[in-house]
Amino acid sequence: MLGCDACKQVILHVPSELHAEKFVGRVNLKECFKSANLIHSSDPDFQILEDGSVYTTNTVILSLAKRTFTILLFNTETQEGREISVLLEGPTEVIKQGYNKEKVLSRPKRRWAPIPCSMQENSLGPFPLFLQQIQSDTAQNYTIYYSIRGPGVDKEPLNLFYVERDTGNLFCTGPVDREQYESFELTAFATTPDGYTPEYPLPLLIKIEDENDNYPIFTETTYSFTVFENCKVGSSVGQVCATDKDEPDTMHTRLRYTILEQSPSPPTLFTMHPATGIITTTSSQLDRELIETYVLKIKVQDMDGQFFGLQTTATCIITIGDVNDNLPTFTRTSYVTSVEENTVDVEILRVTVQDKDLVNTPNWRANYTILTGNENGNFKIVTDPQTNEGVLCVVKPLDYEERQQVTLQIGVVNEAPYTREVTSRSAMSTATVTVTVKNQDEGPVCIPPAQTVRIKENAPLGTRSNGYKAYDPETRSSSGIRYRKLNDPRGWVTVEENSGSITIFRNLDREAETLRNGIYNITVLASDSAGRSCTGTLGIILEDVNDNGPFITRQTVVICKTTMSSAEIVAVDPDEPVNGPPFEFRVESSDPEVRRMWRLSRINDTAARLYYQNDPSFGSYRVPIRVTDRLGLSTLTSLNVIICDCITESDCTTRSGERTGNAEVRLGPWAILAILLGIALLFCILFTLVCGVSRATKQLKVLPDDLAQQNLIVSNTEAPGDDKLYSTNGFTTHTVGTSGQGIGATLGQGVKNGGQETIEMVKGGHQTLDTCHGPGYHHHTMDPCRGGHVETDNYRFTYSEWHNFTQPRLGEKVHLCDQDDVHKHAQDYVLPFNYEGRGSVAGSVGCCSDRPEEDGLEFLDHLEPKFRTLAEVCAKR
């Protein structure tokens, strides 16, 4: 039972017999005297622990019902102390004799309130074991019956507790395991015989006091840890852990860890923290190369490690991890080997090392290096991953004539960095390798592999020159070596077999397409009497002579007449610049007309500008131009110059037939199909027109006198000259006499002068032409072909004549238009519109607008080049 108020008497209910090392109860020491560091019991049969647990040291039998002893709490620093009186109550005489009711009734009554109650785990009895008495104050006035319910009564475990109905004495019928049931929450009831309940149900808590009956258990039977060798003192190795099922935060579960044994034995290298179970090192001399594994036997004990605490043991295996604390060392300090000259990619030596570190780890694997003697890069050393040997190889051929012996110094280190402090003596293990170069009977050597000679490109056939030279490395001479030509792209030279000199076999041309930078390369094979050979390249540098005149690369130029009056021409000379520009350009022709029409001006050393003169017509012209280089060598080029009506050259190229009149037209199948469909459509239109004309000729109409004034003829003549009439629709126009009837059609008149054309339209319907000009008007037939010549009479009118004739008559008719009988305007009369714009250079578009003769077209002279052609068509000149 747990003692109550601090520093007061504590009553513990115990059985009459207590075995040795038996838990009796717990006293609250901290609340009584927190700073106490010395705890003493006045009774030697009892021991008091730090948490206030009371244990028996010997077997105790309570001869009387009670036993008292004192717990002394003392602070040695402050010399202060406290005392706690402990009263042990055993089973009373009443319990043994079945209780005397009179004695019970004469005892003071208790109030109906929760009473702290506890019982010892695994109690030995005797059973039934008296625990407590519950009693209500109402028992003074009523007969009260007591009863309980809850776990241990009417719930599992059943019938563990019961209460006497009349006295309220609470009993336990058997031992209880705290690890199974920590406490029991019962409910007590007080009722009268007739069922009246004078009290509320009373909660009753029975706490099971823990007994140290469970051993602490390690979480693992065998622990495995790893710690690296040469680690510092205090380095953590690992942590072990154990559990105890007894009540937490008591001495029963206060565990203490200990190392019982270390194997191999001394020196002691490990220690364990007693409370946490963390294992650490006590020495920095762990060496894997001496001992790789240590085995520890460890113990855990409850009761804070006191001798009577329960204990368990386990095994801990500690593996020492490897670090690179041993350098690799060569088994020998010097090696000797040999290799034949001109040998490559061969193994010539294997070297071995010793390393005590763990095999097949970066701490053991070796990296070899050639420190000195390999300045030319002839050797390479690598590591054999299977044996950890160093393999020395030749990667670049050696020459006996240059060096007969090579001395190498090699070093070795591990892949992993060295962990210990490095000194100049222990930094790297080194060894010396002496390589002897063996002589071979070699063939000719082509060094350098590319050689050159210089020859003028106009050298005559049969000219001899030095050729490719190879030599024997043994004798350092070229005697006994024969030469043969392997590759000669153009077959220009021959190679003399014994000397290797070359002879010109065909004319040399520095400007040949296959040459680059004026060098002609041939391949030569040099061999000795034993058949050993080598190959080399002979580059023949062709020295330039002035054998090519400059020429114009672009022999067709386009001049867009509307935007430009000249074209730029560029000449090139395949010869060297010393035989090339500056160039002289001139027009060279026996025709004086050509010289008057064209002139040249210099732009720079290689270009000139060609101008046309005297306003030539559109078309293609041949202009002979001679270009001369600085040394007087020249070339005559017949330049094709196209004068085109275009804005850009590409425009003229895409429509050259339309612009120049002489382009070749090629029609595809779709174009031919479109033409056939167009012809069919024209036939349909022609048939319709013929039918309409036939019907119109059958109807006679009286022609008015002012018929000529009703034909609006717009004529634009762009330049003076003879007028030529072209038909745009392919029909023939006829005239009839003064009394005859005519059929008016849409006529197109083309005036061609100086390569330019204008179209003149004459519109009229079912009218005769003789009324316009009188009976003297002639009969004309229009050629349907383009360019057909038709003579015309003077039937053109100026604008002023037409205006003076039509204006009064048209005004009169408009005035009388749409008037009713009383000479007023009709409702649907069209009112005149006001002038909508200001500052416009164009006049009104109305047919009745009054405009001065030849006015309003000056803006056409200031249009951009793109509109020049349109302006030339529209402006009257």
Image (spheres, rainbow, N blue to C red):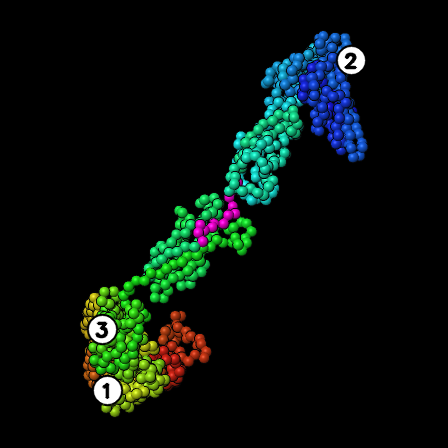
Work out whether residue 189 or residue 55 is closer to the camera in this orientation and state it: 55
Q: Which amino acid type corresponds to the residue marked 1 in the rendered image?
A: Asp
Work out whether residue 275 or residue 258 is closer to the camera in this orientation and state it: 258
Which residue is drawn at the image coordinates 53% and 54% (left, top)?
425
**Residue 319 in the figure: left or right of residue 611:** right
Span of residues in magenta = 320-333
**Residue 672 in the figure: left or right of residue 14:** left
Q: Sequence-wise, which precedes: disc 1 or disc 2?
A: 2
Give the x, y percent position of residue 59: 69, 17
Q: Sequence-wise, which precedes: disc 2 or disc 3?
A: 2
Q: Are marks 1 and 2 in contact (CB under 8 Å)?
A: no
Q: Which amino acid type corresponds to the residue marked 3 in the rendered image?
A: Asn
Disc 3, SS: loop
Determine if the magenta segment contains residue 325.
Answer: yes
One can see residue 130 in this view: yes
Q: The N terminus is located in which quarter?
A: top right
Quadrant position of residue 763: bottom left
Q: Which mark is residue 310?
A: none
**Residue 210 in the figure: left or right of residue 238:** right
Pointer 3 residue = 498
Pointer 2 residue = 107
Q: Which amino acid type corresponds to the residue marked 2 in the rendered image?
A: Arg
